[in-house]
Amino acid sequence: MTDENTQKQPLSMTRRYRRGLILTGVLCVLAMLTAATLLFQRSYVERVDSYIAQICDGYAAAYKAQDTHDAMSFAAMLPEESARTLRFTLIDADGTVLFDSKTSALVYDSTNTLYAVMDSNLPNHADRPEFRRAMEKGSASLTRESETMQTETHYYALRIDTPDGTQVLRVGEDIANIWGLSADTLPLLCAAVVLILLAATLFSWWLTRRMVQPINHLAEHLDTIEADVPYEELIPLARTIQTDRKLREDNETMRREFTANVSHELKTPLTSISGYAELIETGMAKAEDIPTFAARIHKEAQRMIALVSDILQLSELDSNQASRTREAAAEAVPVDLAALVKETAQNMTVNARRAYVTLQYDARPATVQGCRDQLSELTQNLCDNAIRYNRPGGHVELRCGVGSDGCPYFEVEDNGIGIPQDSQTRVFERFYRVDKSRSKATGGTGLGLAIVKHIALLHDARIDLQSQVGTGTTIRVTFPKNP
């Protein structure tokens, strides 16, 4: 029993090309031979009809020139060779057969006088179509087919007006029909098909080898795949492969950097926790220092919890982005952006006061289709980042509304330390910090803006950043227009 999970083996392109070329060659040969047979048959029939018409006209003219117009005088005109290949029939006006070269015998008596011995069983020909047409129109051409003998008889009849009365001379010849002709040429046809089949097989083997070889070469040189594309039709595939390889390399680089950064970020608080715990465990710490050490251990543990929480959240966002479907988009609900901004301002007020930063907001009506929890995380991360990288006495303002283009937006503006120009394109990378010493002092994990970027992608939003060192930073998230 075949396992349903077993992968279906791919078809061989080389074999398909070869079979296609061989089949095409055989079909072309059969079509050509059929057409040639039909054309030959048609040409041959036309020549036969023309030939018997000429023979009939000639003998009719000679017959009319005779003094007597009967079977004996007509029989005397016929040469023996013509009588063997052609059938001559002389018919009276009432349809009576006067002479027929196939059924009448010519006999010479002792005085060398010619007698025509007729077959009395010949039927009357008054109902024959060629006879009737010849009597009406002067001449007629007709073909009768024999299905059993695979032959056809071609007749040409000509009316002859003589002093003795009206008669009809009919000349006929038997030839093979199209089926009989095909049967005669069948051995040659079979031999030709076999030869063509062999030639097509050899040619298809050579051609498919030439066609497939560049593709195999392409697979062996993926580093230069776009430069070595042998066929125009493979350019999209080569670009896709190159893009996929570049994406994989970038992902691998990002994974290594992420692993290194996580290890580094976790190593520092773990080292501190381990050191303080060891001092307490061994009794080397003074009694009055134990509360201080415990506070530091708690602080570093909270830092680790925040880091692990951000990592898990970022992993979940990556998973959602990779598996995002129409059903997930359909589960989006309307989110009141103004209410979300007010809630964020209230939640971040304590942090702002600790940093001696003034927090304000301007919440105008705006609605966004999406996940409220994720949008809340986005606004809080941007607000926290603006507070964290500010100066004592600085200010942060949260704004939301609907732009002139009809798209909802959320904006955070601060007058903090700003972001250098060369770092503005990298601040949304994971663990990237403009000022590492300040980040350590403020307890940032370096994942806040990376989380913001992923949430924006999940909501098809655009992030615009404007910043100047020493002046401040403005980050604006623009969402798609509501349907």
Image: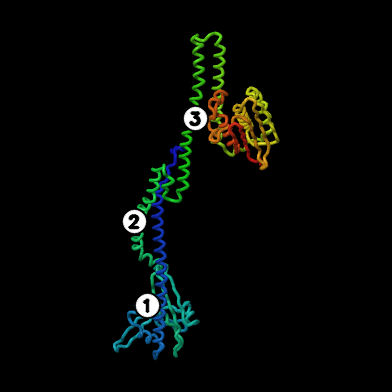
The circle drawn on residue 258 is 3
Corner quadrant of residue 389: top right
| 85 and 400: which is toward the camera | 400
Q: Mark 3 vs mark 2: which is more N-terminal?
A: 2
Dot 2 alpha-carbon crowd within 10 angstroms: few under 14, some 14 to 19, many 20 or more: few
The quadrant of the picture occupied by the C terminus is: top right
Q: Mark 3 vs mark 1: which is more N-terminal?
A: 1
As measured in the structure, the alpha-carbon distance from the residue carrying label 1 to the one carrying label 2 is 44 Å
The circle drawn on residue 198 is 2
- Label 1 or label 2, whichever lies nearer to me, is 2
Residue ID at (30%, 86%)? 109
Q: The residue under label 1 is which amino acid type?
A: Leu
Which element is circle 1 on? Answer: loop
As measured in the structure, the alpha-carbon distance from the residue carrying label 3 to the one carrying label 2 is 62 Å
Residue ID at (36%, 84%)? 75
The circle drawn on residue 24 is none
- Label 3 or label 2, whichever lies nearer to me, is 3
- Residue that carries the numbered disc 1 in the rendered image: 86
Question: Percent x, y for residue 246?
Answer: 47, 39
